[in-house]
Image (cartoon, grey):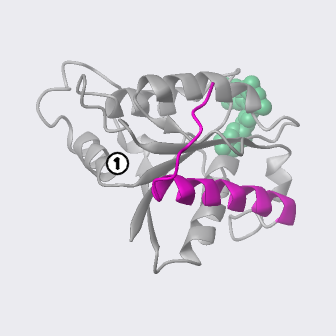
Amino acid sequence: MARIVLVSGSLRRHSVNSAALATIRSILDRRADEFHTSEIRVADLPHYNEDLDVGPGPAAVSAARELLIASDAAVISTPSYNGAMTGTLKNALDWLSRPWKASSLSGKPVALLTASPGTYGGVDAQSDTRRVLERCGAVLIDHPRVAIGNAERLVGRDGTITEPSVVAELEGLVDATITAVRGHRVPLAA
Ligand code: FNR
């Protein structure tokens, strides 16, 4: 049983990024005998403060770190806020990157996607987010690169995306994640 952790960079109730992850969860749930999905909720983590980052740290932080360490891969979806990941996601990555030399992301295969109501799907947030994830020790899944544009009109009543072309893209990302989990060589991001 492989464990996949999902992380949405958005706090918004009707977030298109959370909808993309709900779609990924439904894809993985079709293979529930092979894959178990769980979620790190970035809203549960306090603002990063080194004064709080002592021993196991706040309960929500240690729970998130333990969940990630026990996982085989993570899938992160973030909006672009002015060309970068959201502050709440960066805050979560800062917590998860510590303690120094013991990042919960170290060696972890991570698939990244972005989604936006705009035409370009928040793709301009990807390069910085990849750079930060690599700094945190993650092994980025480089292909396919998924940025879901015009995403708001793609979300159905069940909170998932059913547009076949987007589902196919997300299935491709899931396949790449599974390949990484199985220990195949993962091309590193440039
Ligand atoms: C945005 N939005 C946005 N969209 C985009 O495609 N490129 C951008 O640079 C930005 N910048 C930006 C900054 C801030 C502060 C906000 C609040 C919003 C719009 C954004 O993509 C939209 O609100 C999405 O719906 C956010 O994703 P979720 O919350 O739906 O997942």
Residue located at (11% from left, 32% from top): 55
Considering only vertical position in the picture, is 27 above or below 134? below
Residue located at (54% from left, 77% from top): 31
Q: Quadrant of residue 157?
A: bottom right
On screen, residue 60 versus residue 169, left or right, reads left
Q: Quadrant of residue 54?
A: top left
Residue located at (41% from left, 65% from top): 2
Instruction: Tell me if mark 1 has few (under 14), some (14-19) or many (20+) residues whose alpha carbon lies within 10 angstroms of its own.
Output: many
Give the image location of residue 188, x and y in percent.
57, 33
Q: Is ligand 1 closer than 8 angstroms to the Cβ of mark 1?
A: no
For the stretch drawn in magenta, what is the main secondary structure? helix
In this figure, which residue is indicated by the disc labeled 1? Answer: 68
Is residue 175 something one can see in this rendering?
yes
Residue extent of the magenta highlight? 163-190
Closer-to-camera residue (115/156)? 115
Residue located at (66% from left, 56% from top): 19
Q: Quadrant of residue 112?
A: top right
Give the image location of residue 16, x and y in percent.
70, 49
* Position of the C terminus by quadrant: top right
Closer-to-camera residue (13/33)? 33
Give the image location of residue 163, x and y in percent.
84, 64
Residue extending furthest toward the front: 185
Is residue 155 something one can see in this rendering?
no
Closer-to-camera residue (183/85)? 183
Closer-to-camera residue (89/68)? 68
